[in-house]
Amino acid sequence: MGSYLLVKKYGVDVAKEITDGHERTSFPLGYIGLDDDNRESELQDLYNNRVGRDAAMNKKNKNLKTADIIMKLYQEGKLQHSPFVLKR
């Protein structure tokens, strides 16, 4: 839940730039996120990045421990566990 921690330390704009940018970054094994084989995984990661940012900005979470917030998101089904399935 890196986006959550980045919002707390640097703010929402920096967190979005770093985490969403990471999903589109070139790696030695290929360009992650831009080919059809990884599109569903990229959407999953972008979605979870957004959930983390939203949780960090939620005033209800202000005095809660990070691990507790992440576990709550998981238990409530707010985190995407597998890639989205796109209809073609």
Image (cartoon, helix red, strand yellow):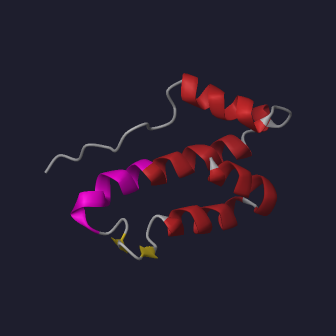
Q: What secondary structure prevails in the magenta region? A: helix
Q: Is residue 75 above or below residue 64?
A: above
The image position of residue 53, as x and y in percent, is 64, 49
Point out the residue furthest to the top here: 75
Residue 61, located in which quarter of the rendered image? top right
Q: Is residue 35 above or below residue 59?
A: below
Residue 42, located in which quarter of the rendered image? bottom left
Point out the residue furthest to the left here: 88
Is 70 inside the magenta-drawn segment?
no
The image position of residue 6, as x and y in percent, is 71, 57
Q: Residue at x 41, y 48 (%)?
A: 44
67 relative position to 18: left or right: right
Segment tinted magenta in the rendering: 35-44
Q: Residue at x 57, y 62 (%)?
A: 19
85 relative position to 32: left or right: left
62 relative position to 17: left or right: right
